[in-house]
Image (spheres, rainbow, N blue to C red):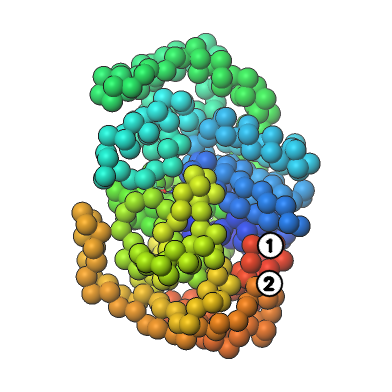
């Protein structure tokens, strides 16, 4: 068996969903291990667009089991909405979706705390998705979180919610001067959804191990390495480990079960939310790249900041994730450019002003012709191949897939990573 870990190498939005969808043709299972509905994976199949936030991208294939590991935080309302959308598209769910009973649940108070905190931070806010992700992970570590397994015992759940939400409401009302949220209203909203989805909840570890014995598995990361709470651009990060270590703690599956680590790298770099971005193009060109690349957040609808490919971050990601090869996405977005830069080095980042010392770039000629939908390396313009080769040489990793458009079939598969 050959299992693949798939992770974003920069600040997320590298196009992981599409690559998972392409690779899921060769797997029996697709496992999410961290984050929550702050993620947004856009998939286009036969011109039909599906945006997944929580459910692994493998769900679009009938023969793939989609598993949500313990490291993911669950919004029951978001899950319900996503399931309804999939059902309306006639996508099979039963016996295909499995959710760990140990997943922590996002409560309405977590969302209110996330929003209140961002508001109070003013200019120095993180720019979170406002989905309650941070406060839910905080409660997990503080040992007052509510897990899916707690919902099976209604009496105990009520007691746990009262205790947990009393604390949240104290901070909400006394510190942030916001309204408190009722436990009864919360239960009335969440219980019917839980009753609808409880058939999907189980201990997922035996299932992952069983699938591992049968066939290939994909471990699907959310966000990107620079949003990792330990290794990213702290404090402008998300609240989980978005790198290899998150896969281990977020599934309970050992690192020995990962045979290939695939970094998903966009042909340029983007970031949504606040925080340092050394190679940012804070100019018209940046806005144009955003326009050509449709760089609008799949989750929040916020415009993404755009810049040149940051090689220094790619190198760090390669280390953090033990990356074996790279899937380069959105190459076609650079089709119009006369010249293209790669950011190769910089000094210290000032975390107050986000200024960076000694930025260094290399510059290559653009190819200025369409690469949209190309499926063979040989059909790419020479200068596009040069760009790809330069990234390979600098990163010392092979580029094994190249995405040339949003659809499933707009892909160059250079190497079969399962063989
Ligand atoms: P949070 O995850 O909502 O707490 O947000 C923390 C930071 O991570 C913010 O800068 C968000 O914009 C960013 N973020 C969270 N999820 C994603 C994602 O899926 N793609 C890109 N950025 C994300």
10 Å neighbourhood of mark 2: few (<14), some, or many (≥20)?
A: some
**Name of the residue lying farthest toward the bottom:** 382
Discs 1, 2 touching: Cβ within 8 Å = yes
Residue carrying label 1: 407
| Closer to us: 10 or 300 | 300
| Label 1 – label 2 distance at C-alpha | 8 Å
Question: Left or right of 147: which side holds 128?
Answer: left
Q: Position of residue 230 (x, y in %)?
A: 33, 51
Rendering quarter of residue 317: bottom left
Q: Quadrant of the C terminus?
A: bottom right
Q: Is residue 315 above or below residue 27?
A: below
Q: Is residue 361 visible?
A: yes
Viewer-side residue, 124 vs 171 = 124
The residue carrying mark 2 is 373
In this image, 144 relative to 150: left or right?
Answer: left
Q: In the image, residue 86 lies at what x, y percent? A: 71, 41
Left or right: 317, with 383 as reference point: left
Q: Is residue 29 visible?
A: no
């Amino acid at each position: 068996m050959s299992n693949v870990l798939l992770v974003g190498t920069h600040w997320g939005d590298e196009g992981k969903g599409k690559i998972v969808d392409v690779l899921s043709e060769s797997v029996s299972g697709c496992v999410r291990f961290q984050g929550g509905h702050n993620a947004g994976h856009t998939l286009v199949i036969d011109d039909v667009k599906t945006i997944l936030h929580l459910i692994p991208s493998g769900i679009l294939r009938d023969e793939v089991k989609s598993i949500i590991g313990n490291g993911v935080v669950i919004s029951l309302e978001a899950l319900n909405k996503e399931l309804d959308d999939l059902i309306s598209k006639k996508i099979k769910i039963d016996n295909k979706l499995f959710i760990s009973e140990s997943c922590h649940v996002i409560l309405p108070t977590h969302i209110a705390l996330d929003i209140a905190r961002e508001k109070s931070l003013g200019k120095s806010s993180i720019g979170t998705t406002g989905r309650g992700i941070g406060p839910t992970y905080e409660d997990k570590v503080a040992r007052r979180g509510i897990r899916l397994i707690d919902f099976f015992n209604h009496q105990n759940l009520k007691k746990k919610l009262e205790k947990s939400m009393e604390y949240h409401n104290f901070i909400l009302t006394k510190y942030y001067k916001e309204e408190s949220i009722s436990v009864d209203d919360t239960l009335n909203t969440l219980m019917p959804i839980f009753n609808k989805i409880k058939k999907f909840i189980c201990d997922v570890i035996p299932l992952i191990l069983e699938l591992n014995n049968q066939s290939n598995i994909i471990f699907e990361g959310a966000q990107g390495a620079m949003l990792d709470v330990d290794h990213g651009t702290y404090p402008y990060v998300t609240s989980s480990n978005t790198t290899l270590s998150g896969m281990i703690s977020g599934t309970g599956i050992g690192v020995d079960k990962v045979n290939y680590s695939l970094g998903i790298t966009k042909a340029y770099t983007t970031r949504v939310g606040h925080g340092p971005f050394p190679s940012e193009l804070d100019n018209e060109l940046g806005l144009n790249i955003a326009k050509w690349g449709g760089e609008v957040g799949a989750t929040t609808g916020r415009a993404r900041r755009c810049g040149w490919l940051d090689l220094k971050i790619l190198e760090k990601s390669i280390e953090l994730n033990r990356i074996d090869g790279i899937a380069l996405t959105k190459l076609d977005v650079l089709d119009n450019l006369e010249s293209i830069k790669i950011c190769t080095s910089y000094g210290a980042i000032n975390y107050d002003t986000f200024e960076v010392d000694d930025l260094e770039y290399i510059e290559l000629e653009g190819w200025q012709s369409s690469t949209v939908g190309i499926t063979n390396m040989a059909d790419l313009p020479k200068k596009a191949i040069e760009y790809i080769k330069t990234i390979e040489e600098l990163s010392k990793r092979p580029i094994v897939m190249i995405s040339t458009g949003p659809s499933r079939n707009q892909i160059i598969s250079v190497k079969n990573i399962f063989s």
